[in-house]
């Protein structure tokens, strides 16, 4: 049971896709206003003779692009990732042309070329961020060599080559660092968001299963009386019909089908009571644990359930919490998948705590990754279909919602070991168990 190596595939695609125009267009409007205002203040206010017409023409190109985006995208307020990358690439080129007309890297505003790269790193995936970073580095390199000098009032200032080289190195390093660091932080946030969404879906599924079980029991109870009436009437009809009547066969069929419905409803009514299917039914903690692992009994691995309560305190009665059910199910499933021959699930309790320990005879957890267990997208089955590395993360998240504390370690003789502990008083209190209906409605 060692779901532990980082997934090699990198980024989950669900974190990317279509980018809101409300993210890109307002940023460009701010840039347009700042560029135009700076050009006018420097030219007219400070008295520097700038190539105002070509420079304002470049700014006007951004105005035109924004208007086109707004008009063409009225029916869709979102851009594909490719279109968003092209828009940010245009912003880099537009700023590079503007800087080329106004001093190149000697212009104090040359640092703004980092802005499109920073925006890209927060909303785009790895490939477009790398492409835009390369474009920005290329633009910085061109601006270091070819540019229109700044129109100084007195003698033109000649910047030492070492100073220009230092500015170039600083901007290139800043581009690479900001792009890489910002993308890493944004990527981690996206991965965590996707993992939390998967946890919520798993919890909602478990809650729906619990609700269906309760509804099935209620339906079996409510339909029992009318079905009994139908069966009685069918028996009387079959008894009163004369021999050879053309309706005898229909009456016999009605009687057999009513009996079949009775058996089905009996099974529906008994199954939730057997495993505590109703979320409002209290059952012993050992029965709850066995119900959570019931699906894995018939697999190749021997699954052993045991209890080890201390003499004196009675076994705690708890509600069938969807969080506990799904969390324990995930951990037991994980143990079964990695065990060689046997998985043991032992439930302990005393007056203060309740503990469930899950142990297997598999390879165990890699020692250097024990501290990372519970993080999303951790899996030894990197790249395998249907294995996103979310099993332990979902289990830990759901169990912690119920107040549990989890400890992952390895057994001295080999194999993985997980201990889940609750404060007994909190586990048995009504208000500590979240109502199923309220939580399920939040995800619909």
Image (cartoon, rainbow, N blue to C red):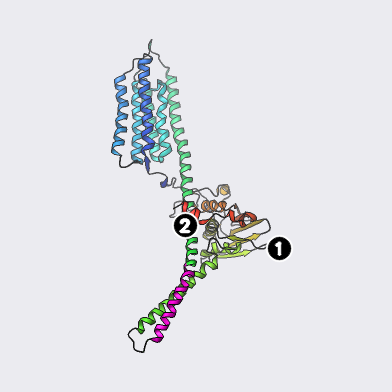
Q: Secondary structure at mark 1?
A: loop
Q: Which residues are magenta?
A: 219-240
**Disc number at residue 312?**
1
Q: Residue 193 at what x, y percent from top left?
A: 47, 46
Q: Nearer the viewer, residue 303 or 434?
A: 434
Q: Are marks 1 and 2 in contact (CB under 8 Å)?
A: no
- Answer whether residue 194 is visible to the viewer in this image: yes
Position of 134 relative to 374 (above/below): above
Q: Nearer the viewer, residue 239 or 213?
A: 239
Position of 261 relative to 367 (above/below): below
Q: Residue 76 at what x, y percent from top left?
A: 32, 42
Q: Residue 245 at what x, y percent from top left?
A: 34, 87
Q: Residue 234 at what x, y percent from top left?
A: 41, 80
Position of 144 relative to 346 (above/below): above
Seen as rendered, the residue at the extreme right is 312
Residue visible at 66% across and 59% down in the picture: 349
């Amino acid at each position: 049971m060692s779901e532990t190596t980082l997934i090699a595939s990198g980024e989950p695609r669900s974190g990317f896709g279509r980018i809101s125009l409300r993210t890109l267009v307002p940023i460009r409007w701010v840039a347009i206003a700042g560029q135009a205002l700076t050009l006018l203040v420097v030219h007219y206010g400070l008295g520097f003779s700038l190539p105002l017409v070509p420079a304002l023409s470049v700014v006007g190109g951004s105005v035109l692009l924004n208007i086109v985006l707004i008009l063409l995208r009225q029916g869709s307020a979102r851009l594909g990732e490719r279109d968003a990358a092209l828009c940010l690439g245009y912003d880099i080129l537009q700023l590079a042309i503007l800087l080329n007309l106004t001093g190149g890297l000697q212009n104090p505003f040359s640092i703004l070329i980092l802005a499109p790269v920073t925006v890209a790193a927060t909303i785009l995936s790895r490939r477009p961020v790398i492409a835009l970073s390369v474009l920005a580095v290329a633009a910085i390199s061109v601006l270091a060599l070819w540019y229109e000098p700044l129109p100084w009032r007195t003698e033109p200032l000649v910047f030492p080559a070492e100073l220009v080289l230092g500015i170039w190195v600083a901007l290139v390093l800043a581009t690479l660092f900001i792009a890489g660091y910002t993308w890493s932080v944004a990527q981690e946030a996206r991965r965590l968001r996707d993992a939390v969404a998967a946890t919520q879906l798993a919890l909602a599924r478990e809650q729906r299963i619990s609700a269906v079980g309760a509804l099935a029991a209620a339906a079996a109870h409510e339909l029992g009386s009318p079905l009994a009436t139908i069966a009685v009437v069918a028996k009387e009809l079959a008894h009163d019909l004369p021999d050879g009547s053309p309706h005898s066969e229909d009456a016999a069929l009605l009687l057999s089908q009513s009996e079949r419905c009775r058996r089905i409803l009996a099974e529906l009514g008994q199954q939730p009571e057997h495993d505590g299917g109703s979320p409002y039914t209290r059952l012993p903690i050992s029965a709850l644990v066995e119900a959570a692992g019931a699906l894995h009994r018939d697999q190749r691995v021997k699954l052993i359930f045991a209890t080890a309560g201390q003499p004196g305190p009675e076994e705690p009665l708890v509600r069938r919490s969807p969080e506990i059910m799904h969390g324990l199910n995930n951990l037991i499933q994980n143990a079964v998948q990695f065990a060689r021959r046997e998985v043991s699930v032992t439930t302990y309790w005393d007056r203060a705590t309740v503990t469930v320990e899950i142990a297997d005879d598999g390879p165990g957890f890699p020692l250097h990754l024990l501290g990372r267990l519970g993080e999303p997208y951790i899996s030894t089955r990197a790249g395998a279909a249907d294995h996103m590395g979310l099993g332990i993360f979902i289990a830990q998240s759901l169990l912690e919602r119920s107040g549990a504390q989890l400890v992952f370690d390895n057994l001295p003789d080999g194999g993985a070991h997980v201990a889940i502990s609750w404060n007994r008083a909190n586990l048995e209190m009504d208000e500590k168990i979240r109502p199923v209906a309220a939580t399920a409605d939040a995800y619909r």
